[in-house]
Every structure is written in structure tokens, then in C-alpha cells.
């Protein structure tokens, strides 16, 4: 196990060693990864937020497909949990554990931070962009591989509660499987938590190939991991398109994000909600309406 991980770490990812990655990732031995289930529970079923950037060419969306996963033919890069031609539905969720009012109000910023270069790029001091948020409701159980490092203490309380649950799961394993699992999780978590600069998509090779192999060789729907762009304040999900029948869009919101500098030199973000609508069941299109001021 340690030798395999060291070989993975030693790979020159700029050369895109796909065959070697496949070989090493499929030879990690016995590993147990905890599954996070989101179940359909009537009116209180889990909701997943997906953000999509608007552009000058597409200032407004009106189709469900446009706020869903990227079509495989357009997915040409390696991303955190997807490979070229093997697309995933990316979204964000927040913990259900004792959220305070501020966490509930700011939940949408997790999804925005994952897609908005305006928010992520510290070199851009001021500006604005438009983002469309789709809220998707879980209609059938979604099961996701949980990628965190159980050996560290996180800054966020909800992640540490997740670590506690992971240890309950780990302590039920045979000792050798438990030790292997801890080594693999520590390695995978570091790969999923990388901050990657624009254009360096090779840095996503290990996390994306792991996800591809996992979803192809298991019955599970995808992976879940702490949000990198929001410093762990929320969780990201990557769900395979074959499981999209388990989700349904219920609401759409178009917002304008403004970034400015305050007098103390700190950046300030303002999200202004502009248009929204309810999505009808099984609808392929929707119509955004101006929100009342």
C-alpha cells in the first residue's frame, strides 16, 4: 500500500500518465470507504445547489439541461472529479447539523465560490458577474463515497462530526483493512483538497481518475468532499449522470455578484438576487421572472 501511494506521488502528472494511474489506482488493495447517503424524505428531502456561470453569450438560461451536468462531448478537461468525455453533475450541500442563521443565509456562497473566478481570483480586486443557481431535490437515495482525512482535526465543527462517524466505521474493520484505508484516505483527501491554478488541469488527474474508476466499478452514485474554494464551509458532490433520475430541479435563481474593495482594503462580496422561478415537475424549460424589490 505505502509503495503504491509513493509511486502515485512520484508520477509526473504533466505527462498525463493515464495507463500508469489506472494500474496503480486499481492496485491499492482492500480499502473501506464510508458512504454518505442522502435519502428522499418527503418535504424535507436533501437539496443540492448547483451554480452555473452566465456569460455575455448566455445572459439568461431557460432550459433544465443548461443548469444540469455538462454534456460529455463538451467536457474536454480533467476536473476535480471528472475526466474528458466522462462528465459529472457538480453541486454543493451544507451540513444538516444544528446550522445557525448565518450558515443558512450564506449557504449559496459555497456553490458560487466553486464556479466563480471573480470570487476565487485574488488578482481581480473589483468587478461583477452573473450566476444562475439551480436547486435540485433528492427524490431517490443517492450514495456517495466520502473523501475526508480522518487523521486530522478540521476547523469546521461539522467536518469533525463527520470524522467521528468515520472512525465508528473504521473501527468495525479488520486491522489491516483499517490501516490501508487510513493511508488511502489521507492520500486521496490531499488530492481532492488541492487548490489548482487555472490551466493546471493535470493536477486533477488522481482525484478525477479515482472518481472515474470508483463510479465505473461500483453501484454508487459519486463522491462527496469538503469544498476547496470555500475553505471547507460546505461539501461538494459529484454525481454520475446515470443517477440524475434520482434528482429533480425545483427552483432556479439568477443572481449578480459584485466584488469591491472596502476602506480597510478588504474585498467585499454582494449577491443580489435578480430573477427566479419554480420548475414544474418533468419540465424541460422554465421562465425566470423579475423578483419584486
Image (tube, rainbow, N blue to C red):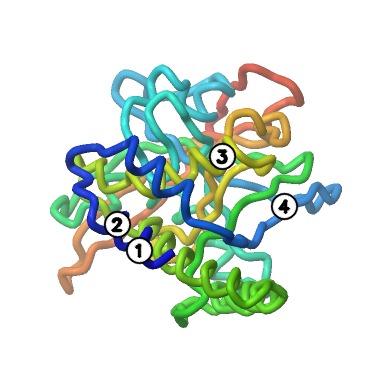
Q: How many marks?
A: 4
Query: Badge 1 local density, few (<14 within 10 Å), some, or many (20+)?
Result: few
- Circles 2 and 1: CB distance less than 8 Å? yes
Which numbered marker is on residue 38?
Answer: 4
Please tell me in which quadrant of the rendered image residue 198 appears: top left
Considering the numbered disc 1 on the image, is that residue within a helix, a strand or a loop?
Answer: helix
Query: Badge 4 local density, few (<14 within 10 Å), some, or many (20+)?
Result: some
The residue at which mark 2 appears reads as 7
Mark 4–mark 3 Cα distance, whole angstroms, equals 34 Å
Residue at image coords 54%, 73%: 159
Residue at image coords 25%, 51%: 196
Q: Nearer the viewer, residue 82 or 124?
A: 82
On-image quarter of the N terminus: bottom left
Which numbered marker is on residue 292?
Answer: 3
Considering the numbered disc 3 on the image, is that residue within a helix, a strand or a loop?
Answer: loop
Residue at image coords 40%, 43%: 23
Mark 4–mark 2 Cα distance, whole angstroms, equals 35 Å
Residue 55's place in the image compared with 128, above or below, is above
Q: Position of residue 77 (x, y in %)?
A: 31, 31
Residue 233's place in the image compared with 72, above or below, is below
Residue at the extreme bottom:
153
Tag nearer the camera, 3 or 1: 1
Left or right of residue 253, residue 227 in this image = left
Considering the numbered disc 2 on the image, is that residue within a helix, a strand or a loop?
Answer: helix
The residue at which mark 1 appears reads as 3
4 or 3: tag closer to the N-terminus: 4
Amino acid at each position: 500500500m505505502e509503495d503504491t501511494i509513493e509511486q502515485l506521488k512520484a508520477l509526473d502528472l504533466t505527462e498525463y500518465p493515464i495507463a500508469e494511474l489506472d494500474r496503480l489506482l486499481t492496485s491499492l488493495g482492500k480499502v473501506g470507504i464510508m458512504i454518505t447517503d442522502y435519502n428522499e424524505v418527503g418535504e424535507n428531502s436533501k437539496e443540492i445547489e448547483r451554480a452555473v456561470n452566465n456569460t455575455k453569450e448566455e445572459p439568461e438560461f431557460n432550459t433544465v439541461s443548461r443548469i444540469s451536468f455538462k454534456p460529455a462531448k463538451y467536457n474536454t478537461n480533467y476536473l476535480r472529479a471528472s475526466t474528458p468525455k466522462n462528465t459529472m453533475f457538480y453541486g454543493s450541500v451544507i451540513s444538516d447539523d444544528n446550522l445557525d442563521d448565518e450558515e443558512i443565509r450564506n449557504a449559496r456562497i459555497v456553490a458560487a465560490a466553486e464556479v466563480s473566478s471573480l470570487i476565487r481570483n485574488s488578482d481581480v480586486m473589483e468587478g461583477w458577474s452573473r450566476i444562475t443557481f439551480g436547486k435540485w431535490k433528492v427524490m431517490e437515495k443517492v450514495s456517495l463515497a466520502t473523501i475526508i482525512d480522518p487523521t486530522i482535526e478540521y476547523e469546521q465543527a461539522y467536518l469533525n462530526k463527520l470524522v467521528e462517524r468515520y472512525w465508528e466505521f473504521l473501527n468495525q474493520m479488520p486491522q489491516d483493512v483499517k490501516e490501508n484505508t487510513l493511508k488511502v484516505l489521507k492520500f486521496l483527501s490531499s488530492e481532492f483538497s488541492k487548490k489548482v491554478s487555472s490551466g493546471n488541469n493535470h493536477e486533477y488527474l488522481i482525484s478525477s481518475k479515482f472518481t472515474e474508476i470508483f463510479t465505473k466499478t461500483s453501484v454508487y452514485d459519486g463522491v462527496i468532499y469538503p469544498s476547496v474554494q470555500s475553505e471547507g464551509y460546505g461539501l461538494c458532490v459529484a454525481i454520475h449522470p446515470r443517477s440524475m433520475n434520482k434528482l429533480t430541479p425545483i427552483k432556479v435563481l439568477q443572481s449578480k455578484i459584485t466584488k469591491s474593495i472596502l476602506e480597510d482594503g478588504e474585498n467585499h462580496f454582494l449577491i443580489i438576487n435578480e430573477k427566479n422561478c419554480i420548475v414544474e415537475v418533468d419540465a424541460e424549460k422554465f421562465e425566470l421572472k423579475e423578483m419584486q424589490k
